[in-house]
């Protein structure tokens, strides 16, 4: 990972000021990478004597409950005491981790826009970051924000600064964002970093079990239902989609995070190059997109669903009905294919 020496020195100077009040923010529907990178970075900053508050817009999935320090994360949506707003208003530095645009904070966006004094630092691996940051570490060639945070710690202090606890947190994001080391940007540097984390004493089987083998029965049955009853193939079997209505989710006692991984499953079918998941929320439909190889779902999400993300994993939102959303998807896929984007 080529980190800018100039940027590293600016970050070092920023953090050399004593006892800074720091807020670490991550994206809506925080995942393992969002939470892992936030908590590990918070540990580093606290070790330097700073006061740190981690804030996420809404709740993280229950299978991350075991992560060291997660109980301190302020969930803005249920923060009745105004802790998040106060921490943001008092902050000297705001770190934005694992997202590229303030709009990805959704219900938390306004609170952030109101704060004008704090220095804003972006640490992220999504394409096309927004302007409006004072210091940017944007590395779309990093497989996770956790790996990027690892590289930052290494550049600032050396790997001796990494504790086992930080190692566990960082490994979660490295593992989940790479689909357990199966997607892109699997560089030798990443595996060297993993080797260092193993030297620190992390247990890869324990972390794997805590994240991937900790679902509810309802989730397992919902998965079966979604694949068997709700997965559709179009475009001569090369494009898949799946949808879940709120009533269907209720039937399986749906909890936040339960649909994680469903969208990837269609890509286990050899012919399938692109897959979508439509998940109904009260006010809109959340869309997850995945692809393989050169099929660019970041482009697709931007063009047709006002979203974005990475080349092989992106998302967006739809504010019309499920039927209309699916119709729009089917039409958009046909246009995308006709323009040669499906290979
Ligand atoms: P997921 O399907 O896991 O929710 O999201 C996959 C990727 O797409 C993530 O990297 C995420 O940041 C991005 N993404 C998901 N939803 C949106 C969205 O509404 N807007 C943008 N710009 N990116 C999104
Ligand atoms: Mn990430």
Image (spheres, rainbow, N blue to C red):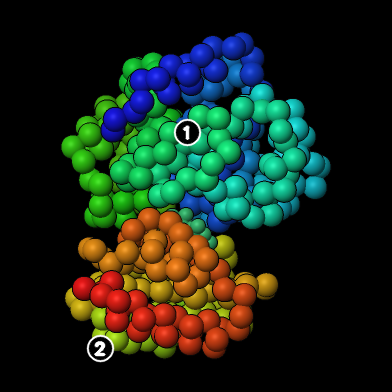
In this view, 300 is above or below 122: below
Residue extending farthest to the front is 339
**What number is the disc on residue 136?**
1
Residue extending farthest to the right is 81
**For residue 252, what is the image quadrant?**
bottom right
Q: Is mark 2 within 8 Å of ligand 1?
A: no
* Lower position in the chain sequence, tag 1 or tag 2: 1
Is 293 displayed left or right of 65 in the figure?
left
Is 313 displayed left or right of 25 in the figure?
left
In this view, 106 is above or below 51: below
Q: Secondary structure at mark 1?
A: strand
Is 310 displayed left or right of 90 in the figure?
left
Could you say which is closer to the camera, residue 279 or residue 64? 279
Which of the image's four quarters has the C terminus?
Answer: bottom left
Q: Position of residue 147 (x, y in %)?
A: 35, 37
Q: Residue at x 61, y 19 (%)?
A: 50
Count of marks placed on residues: 2
**What number is the disc on residue 236?**
2
Q: Position of residue 40 (x, y in %)?
A: 47, 32
Tell me if mark 2 has few (under 14), some (14-19) or many (20+) residues whose alpha carbon lies within 10 angstroms of its own. few
Q: Mark 1 and mark 2: span between their CA atoms?
A: 43 Å
Q: Residue at x 54, y 17 (%)?
A: 15
Which of the image's four quarters has the N terminus?
Answer: top left
Q: Secondary structure at mark 2?
A: loop
Cβ–Cβ under 8 Å for marks 1 and 2? no
Could you say which is closer to the camera, residue 198 or residue 300? 300
Could you say which is closer to the camera, residue 244 or residue 8? 8
Q: Is residue 69 shown to the viewer in this render?
A: no
**For residue 229, what is the image quadrant?**
bottom left
Q: Is residue 203 shown to the viewer in this render?
A: yes
Q: Residue at x 57, y 53 (%)?
A: 104
């Amino acid at each position: 990972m080529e980190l800018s020496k100039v940027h590293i020195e600016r970050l070092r100077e920023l953090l050399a000021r004593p006892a800074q009040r720091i807020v670490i923010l991550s994206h809506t529907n925080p995942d393992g990478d969002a939470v892992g990178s936030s908590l590990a970075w918070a540990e580093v900053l606290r070790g330097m004597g700073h006061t740190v508050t981690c804030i996420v817009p809404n709740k993280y999935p229950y299978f991350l409950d075991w992560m060291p320090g997660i109980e301190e994360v302020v969930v803005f949506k249920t923060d009745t005491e105004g802790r998040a707003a106060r921490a943001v208003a008092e902050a000297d530095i705001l770190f934005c981790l694992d997202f590229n645009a303030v709009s990805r904070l959704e219900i938390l966006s306004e609170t952030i826009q109101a704060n004008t004094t704090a220095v804003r630092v972006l640490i992220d691996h999504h394409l096309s970051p927004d302007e409006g940051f004072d210091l940017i570490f944007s590395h779309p060639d990093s497989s996770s924000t956790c790996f990027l945070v690892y590289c930052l710690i290494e550049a600032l202090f050396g790997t001796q600064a990494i504790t086992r606890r930080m190692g566990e947190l960082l490994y979660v994001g490295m593992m989940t964002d790479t689909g357990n080391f199966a997607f892109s940007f699997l560089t030798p540097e990443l595996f060297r970093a993993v080797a260092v984390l193993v030297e620190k004493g992390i247990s890869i089987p324990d972390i794997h079990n805590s994240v991937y083998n900790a679902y509810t029965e309802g989730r397992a049955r919902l998965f079966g239902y979604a694949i068997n009853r709700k997965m559709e193939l179009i475009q001569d079997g090369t494009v898949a989609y799946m949808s879940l209505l709120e009533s269907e989710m209720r039937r399986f006692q749906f909890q936040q995070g339960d649909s994680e991984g469903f969208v990837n499953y269609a890509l286990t079918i050899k012919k399938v190059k692109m897959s979508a998941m439509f998940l109904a929320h009260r006010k809109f439909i959340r869309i997850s997109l995945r692809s393989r190889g050169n099929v660019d779902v970041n482009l697709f999400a931007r063009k047709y669903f006002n979203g974005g993300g990475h080349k092989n994993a992106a998302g967006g939102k739809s504010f019309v009905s499920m039927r209309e959303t699916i119709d729009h998807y089917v039409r958009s896929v046909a246009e995308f294919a006709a323009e040669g984007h499906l290979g």
